[in-house]
Amino acid sequence: MMLHRNILLYGEVEKPLIQQELQAGPLSLIYEEGDLRYIKLGDLEVLRGINVTFKDRYWNTVPKVISNVLMEIAEDWFNITYKAEHKNDDVDFSWKGVITGNTNGNITFKMEGVARSTFLRNRIGFCTLHPITECAGRPCVVETIDGDLHQGLFPEDISPYQVFTQMRAVTYEILPGLSAEIRLNGDIFEMEDQRNWTDASYKTYCTPLCSTPVEIKEGTAIAQTVTLTLKGEVPRLKRRTRSPGITFSVSEKPLTRLPRIGLCMASHGRALSQKELERLKALNLSHLRVDLDLTIDDSISAFRLASSDASKLGVPLEIALILSDNAGDELKALVRSLDQIKPSIWTWLIFHKEERSTPEWLIKYAQDQLARYSPDTLFGAGTNIYFTELNRNRPPMHLLDLACYPITPQVHVNDDNSLIENLEAQSWTVRQANQFSGGLPIAVTPVTFKPRFNPDNPSPKTSIASDQLPPQVDVRQMALFGAIWTACSLKYLSEAGAHSATYFETTGWRGVMETEEGSPLPEIFHSLPGCVYPLYHVLADVGEFSGGDVLLTESSDNIMVNGLAVRKDGRTRVLIANLCDERRDVTVRNLGKYVRVFYLDESNAVRAMRSPEAIRAREGNLLQTSAGTIRMSLLPYAVARIDDG
């Protein structure tokens, strides 16, 4: 069976959104399907993006469908108009967008819409994204809705709550003597720190959280405007051009230890086959996570299966216990099963089903009931939802052996470019958690492409159309995109000092390989039965260095090319990922005299999926470096493995 090239790259035949480069005087920017991205002055990022967002009453994104796009584009100005619709269940909302940029560097984005049905919503309107690198710790001036001006700071640490409220405008310096003013009309705006959800930006958004949800009556008109204005002397800058190549450097000194890396039990509930067990053993896993919801019936059967699979893999369990106010009876039943199953347990993770962060009483109670079974087992707690819940409601760290939280990159957005640019925010969460926990080990568990559940919807739909994927499944899981994203997630979590990282699942469309039965919806999720996914090879490459050290790496453009380096027993391995769907030339520095290079890309991805053992036996081509430097050309979404020669 052959796979379409786009399926190998993105997981689906349809190509991602097409981008249009624009210029507004000295500012460069990108138009993408009704949104603006990467508004820059030279190499300085002024805004990460401006978009119109629709969130329903449960914070689900209602996607927009764009039509009637008209573009008038000149060398240093532009005018774009289009129509947009949001439809989902009871929602029916349409609007017109008008985006203009003039030769002075001013950009105006207007939306005018009308509700064609009555519905509840949490947000309709503009979000402006401010970049972390250029803004963190920098001063700004906030104009409130009553016209007052307030001096403020973009927070350096991740702010648990709103940074600013009651906003009408925010102004901050780009260069000495030059500022950017972002003025907002049509609603009340406030700003949050999106690193709480591993988005690499501060977001100014409409409708205060304290006012949601809002009922919108049929016929209601909504009009908003965002205006970006440059204030001050604009220096003469050379027009931005694409760099002819990217440099990637590897440091010599070890930075930290490689995290313990594990996987989650498969959600399909089937035992691992012998072939799957052998392939999973090649990952050199440290643990296997199982979620035991002790508030429901039949959780012990999942426990038995997890214990059996973990024993066959030769790894201990990371057990996430979901408890309620009836924890006494729930834990008594668990203790009885412990004496029967006798599992090897590395960590207990304690969560309350109704609480967003683990309460102190539950930690103490669980320790009292469970410590007798395995005195050396670690106790962890925190949140099973998002990092923001741990940041806002911190459990008593003095009672714990480690603090934990999960990561998913699609709380707010789901396009390829956003998933790549937001990767760096993962490291911010680890450093912040390490800071407020007093140096407690940090377990990032689990890391998944999509949220496992919606904590804001107490009664989600249980039925899914037969031709639709479950909301937890992402087609990029089985594609090269999944591999490059996983490589960079490992980079940021490792370099930030995470103690452990638990990824994805063992098998199935949320795992590292497909089941032998194959995809339940092969016409949508195009995996090959019994084959591994490209991200399997990334985990295997890193797993071979389990217990080793992480070396600091640096890319000259970390949203185009990035990667990580590990060392163990005198061996060094570098993984470099091309994070875009175009070929990229890369110069790699600070290597040894001889290296072996192997590429995982569209030319061999199917073979790597079908025959991982044969592919992994290949050492790569032996090359002599030039004073520790090599130049390579990476195909779209390729991963290069560089080993000491």
Image (cartoon, rainbow, N blue to C red):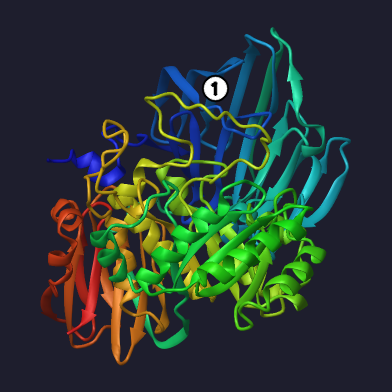
- Is 281 in front, or is 638? 281
Which residue: 62% across, 9% down? 116
Circle 1 residue:
98
Query: Does residue 53 sit above or below 556 in this rendering?
Result: above
Query: Does residue 506 sit above or below 181 in this rendering?
Result: below
Residue 389's x, y, as percent? 71, 55
- Is 159 in front, or is 411? 411
The quarter holding residue 445 reads bottom right
Quadrant placement of the N terminus? top left
Indicate left or right for 7 with 311 as reference.
left
- Is residue 253 visible in the rendered image? The answer is yes
Element assignment for label 1:
strand
Category of crowding for the residue at label 1, using alpha-carbon neighbours closer than 10 angstroms: few (below 14), some (14–19), many (at least 20): some
Indicate left or right for 89 with 502 as reference.
right
- Is residue 26 visible in the rendered image? The answer is no
Which residue: 13% across, 53% down? 603
- Is 565 in front, or is 129? 565
Residue 32's x, y, as percent? 43, 34
Which residue: 48% across, 60% down? 304
- Is 42 in front, or is 383? 383
Amino acid type at circle 1 is: Val
